[in-house]
Image (cartoon, helix red, strand yellow):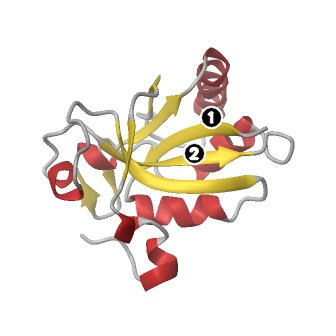
Amino acid sequence: MVEKATFAAGCFWGVETAFRKIPGVKEVEVGYTGGTTENPTYEQVCTGKTGHAEAIQILFDPKQVSYEKLLEFFWQMHDPTSWHRQGPDVGSQYRSAVFYHSPKQEEKAKEVKARLEKSKHHSKPIVTEIVPAGPFYRAEEYHQRYHEKHGGSCPT
């Protein structure tokens, strides 16, 4: 049986590539979530007016990788202290967020975040949102596995 996890950590191309390498992750799709527009396009999300974040949705085997391990990786692979920004990418669509699918995921996300905050690993506060998962809109096909198809980095 597989479970679902949804994260936003900046440009979804790099996030997708990083999570695909984790043993136990069965599938990763890039898309948009957390906003108000139904079936948004990339161009709409880029305006910052839809409220969506560029995100990934993962199907994983909890017997091979725990949700907690995915959360720990999530917080290590990006800057969770940067408000609506990751590297050169600026805007609410690049925010840091955990979109939980169950009360158990919510509890675990808050627990791991609190542990990270207590560790003082970051000198600034963690601004990652922990919010209920809503509709996830799969991004256009040319965004799926972008680095595998084209290489390169996220546009600035």
Q: Residues within 10 Å of mark 2 (few under 14, many from 20)?
A: many
Secondary structure under the numbered disc 1 in the rendered image: helix
Mark 1 or 2, nearer chain start: 2
The residue nearer to you, when weighing 82 against 54, is: 54
Relative to 61, is 113 above or below?
A: above
Q: What percent of the width, then of the height, locates residue 105?
A: 63, 25
**Gap in angstroms between the C-alphas marked 1 and 2:** 8 Å
Residue type of the residue flagged with mark 1? Leu
Q: Residues within 10 Å of mark 1 (few under 14, many from 20)?
A: some
Q: What percent of the width, then of the height, locates residue 127?
A: 41, 34
The residue nearer to you, when weighing 17 against 72, is: 17
Q: Residue at 50% x, 43% y: name it.
A: 7
Q: Are marks 1 and 2 in contact (CB under 8 Å)?
A: yes
State the mark number for residue 75.
2
Question: How many numbered discs?
Answer: 2
Q: What percent of the width, then of the height, locates residue 103?
A: 61, 15
Q: Quadrant of the C terminus?
A: bottom left
Relative to 27, is 136 above or below?
A: above
Q: What percent of the width, then of the height, locates residue 89?
A: 28, 60
Is residue 151 visible in this depiction of the protein? no
